[in-house]
Amino acid sequence: MIDEERKKYKPTIPKDLINLSAVSFAKSDPTSCMGDQEQIQSQFSSLFGEPIIKISSDTQKSDSISMKIGVVFSGGQASGGHNVICGLFDAIGEMNPKSELFGFIGGPSGIVENQYKKLEKEDVDFVRNMGGFDLIGSGRTKIETDDQLKSSLETAKKLKLDAIIVIGGDDSNTNAAFLAQYFLDNGCTTSVIGVPKTIDGDLRNDQVEISFGFDTACKCYSEMISNIERDAISAKKYYHFIKLMGRSASHIALECALNTHPNFTVIGEEVKEKKMTLDQIVSDICDMIVKRSEMDHNFGVVLIPEGLIEFIPEMEVLIGELNSILAKNPTDPISDLSSEAKKTFQSIPKSIQDQLLLDRDPHGNVQVSHISTEKLISQSVKEKLKQWEGYKGKFSPVEHFFGYEGRAAFPSNFDATYCYALGRVAALLAKKKLTGYMALVKNLTKKSVEWVPCGVPIVSMMNMEIRKGKSKPVIRKSLVDLNSKSFKTFANSREEWMFEPCYNYVGSIQYFGPESVTDQIPKIVQLEG
Ligand code: FBP
């Protein structure tokens, strides 16, 4: 029932994207990249330096050509993905009803293996304003080997595609640029266009104000966190340790903290900057617990970002050593650790030791995202409190992991509207035969009618970084900036949130009701404008 009502939601289209047959494309000066210009330019000789394209409504009508477009989801689910497809489908249909949209099945492997489904109106209508990626599925295959690139080109030729739209995060958009360059090098006219997706919020820079999915995910987590806060302050007997998704950056933890005012939030980037050890983080939390206990508050809420473990210097060393040792499949990996890493290993709880040794990804590396950091912290806090001089308070920890719960919810109004607009921008960039571009919408702090559509060369967001031991061109990941307004707002309030009754109860995402409630944009976007 509720889903049927939600499907009826009509995103307000930015004014420059209403009439797609009357738009102009203004070019900026040539762009460069985020660093390592020489290497980036040599890898992307045809894409480097392309201008930013600003799209505006125009009085002059242009030809309405029919197009064949392929679309693919790449990586983890993020709410709003289906609306990108809806926006794209509607846009190419409005431009010419003979246009066709093909969805590649199961992620980028669908392009390599030519597995697709022609999307019809009823398919698309079924997922309007719905979460998940189930219309066509997603996957984490990277199109990088010669064979994969060649097969992708064959698929593009067989289907006579005008464009392939890659809906993905930083890695997927980097790969989209490689595919675009490969197509150009091999005389293939199919454009490749990216769309910025990831709940993690780490695909963010001067051009990308926020990736889609972040808003809905944070609103879901914030609802659950504030429910737990209310439970904690009612029962007054548990400390809740909540790990939040965000593989590399702590944007989700920061956004949720700004929303819900928990007693303690660990920000991985700050840990790294201050070179904090695990023991220091644990001591800081214990310090708060002891002081709260003196106020008779033996309860609280602590947020921990998923990627924390790699920001802790000694854990980073340990994981790095384990990755190279485990690759050789030794019978006793611990004996090969340096004395520093061995000491760290021995200091962590047995259950986490086992996770480090047994849980490995397909490349043989430690599955960092699967490590129960919330348990590592809560168990270490428990151990430390036992030895805390003079501490007589109670400590009952409860651990949680909020991750998948937030990735496939009905998109918030912001994500639903943003994604629908992104789909329309992607259609226009395809019509203009631009390749290696990311479809973007800016000015997001304004009402959606004022949002500014544009296309930005993916290469302009790149620099060289070491990945799996090799220097590679990649889109620079955005980490929490400790000088940003959002971090400073958090830092200025956290002392108060530790000890005063400050919990902020946000309730669930609101899809119906006054705009002031339904159309809230992410706090970090509001603050950084
Ligand atoms: P993307 O970067 O692909 O959007 O995925 C992000 C994420 O949700 C992380 O927060 C999390 O670590 C990871 O996906 C989990 O991946 P998987 O779905 O493979 O378990």
Image: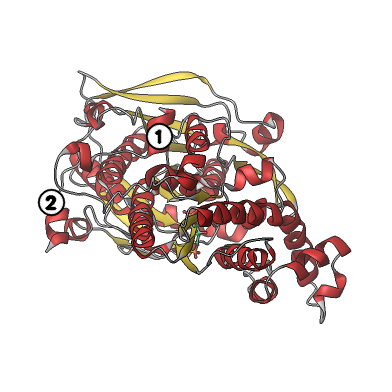
Tag 1 secondary structure? helix
Residue 170 seen from this side: yes
Q: CA distance from mark 1 to mark 2?
A: 27 Å
Q: Which residue is mark 2?
A: 8
Between label 1 and label 2, give the one nearer the viewer. Answer: 1
Nearer-the-camera pick, 133 or 260: 260
* Label tally: 2
The local crowd at label 1, few if under 14, some if 14 to 19, many if 20 or more residues have their Cα within 10 Å, is: some
Relative side of 210 to 187, left or right: left
Nearer-the-camera pick, 421 or 265: 265
Quadrant in the picture for residue 377 = bottom right
The local crowd at label 2, few if under 14, some if 14 to 19, many if 20 or more residues have their Cα within 10 Å, is: few
In x, y percent, where is residue 43? 65, 39
Relative side of 73 to 90, left or right: right
Residue 47 seen from this side: no
Q: Is residue 60 above or below residue 394?
A: above
Q: Is residue 346 above or below residue 147?
A: below
Nearer-the-camera pick, 4 or 21: 4
Q: Quadrant of the N terminus?
A: bottom left
Q: Is residue 364 above or below residue 8?
A: below
In x, y percent, where is residue 409? 30, 58
Point 62% across, 33% down: residue:
45
Tag 2 secondary structure? loop
In x, y percent, where is residue 9? 15, 48
Point 55% across, 45% down: residue:
174
Q: Which residue is mark 1?
A: 525
Q: Tag 2 or tag 1, which sits nearer the N-term?
A: 2
Colour basis: secondary structure
- For the residue marked with disc 2, what is the amino acid? Lys
In x, y percent, where is residue 100? 26, 51
